[in-house]
Image (tube, rainbow, N blue to C red):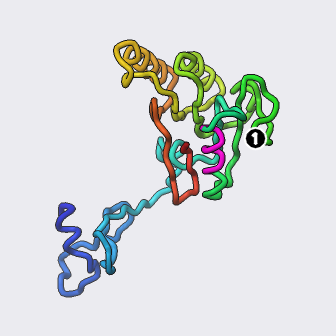
Amino acid sequence: MDHRERLAHTDDENPSQPDREPLSRAGRTVAGPRAAGDLGILKTTIDHDCMSHPLAALFSPRSIAFVGATERSVWTRAAFANLRTLGYDGKIFLVNRKGGEVLGHPAVSTIREIGEPVDVALLMVPSETLLDTLPELSAAGIRNAIILSAGFAESGPAGRELQERLMNLAREHGISLLGPNCLGFVNYTNKAPVWR
């Protein structure tokens, strides 16, 4: 049965069609009830723990590191405010090469100083330093990163070459990337806006 047929059969338990397989089984695509204004959006139910998916730590992080966080950065302030606004209750680590405090919270000067597992890093460092940043992430055990920085393929041949080197380095270190030149994402379900 293809997706068009699934949309047409919203009454899964219709006894008048006993040979039709119900669509509401776990792991199957289902069409929800048709309410006023409903666009017929399909939902997918999952019959296993969502954290077992390889990208779960990226899109449902329980801990986030802001690498390149500074007091004067509009990016840092906005990303931090988004976490607070949505009610994110996971751990937040701030990394600033000078250490100290950023936005009233303690900051470490290197990624390794975090000293505990981190699900995703929001990289707010200049594009030319990212080639040094990815090995640091790997050494700290961070396997997911969002790159806010610009200056890659969108900027011309030199940027395209830098992006290719970055992608190869990410593959070499087993790091999943979202970006570059990316504002991040918002996961409303888990209240995780890793987003500028």
Q: Position of residue 112 (x, y in %)?
A: 71, 25
Q: Position of residue 38 (x, y in %)?
A: 32, 73
Q: Which residues lie in the magenta part? A: 75-82
Element under label 1? Answer: loop
User: In the picture, residue 159 is in which quadrant?
Assistant: top left
Q: Residue at x 28, y 81 (%)?
A: 13
Task: Tell me if residue 186 comes above or below residue 72 in the rendering.
Answer: below
Q: Which residue is mark 1?
A: 103
Q: Position of residue 149 (x, y in %)?
A: 51, 28
The residue closer to the viewer here, 193 or 2, is 193
The residue closer to the viewer here, 187 or 149, is 149
User: In the picture, residue 25 is in which quadrant?
Assistant: bottom left
Task: Tell me if residue 19 comes above or below residue 92 in the rendering.
Answer: below
- How would you rate the neighbour count of disc 1 (Cα within 10 Å): few for under 14, some for 14-19, many for 20 or more? some
Q: Position of residue 9 (x, y in %)?
A: 22, 75
In the image, is 161 to the left or to the right of 20?
right
In the image, is 71 to the left or to the right of 163?
right
The residue closer to the viewer here, 129 or 26, is 129
User: In the picture, residue 12 is in which quadrant?
Assistant: bottom left
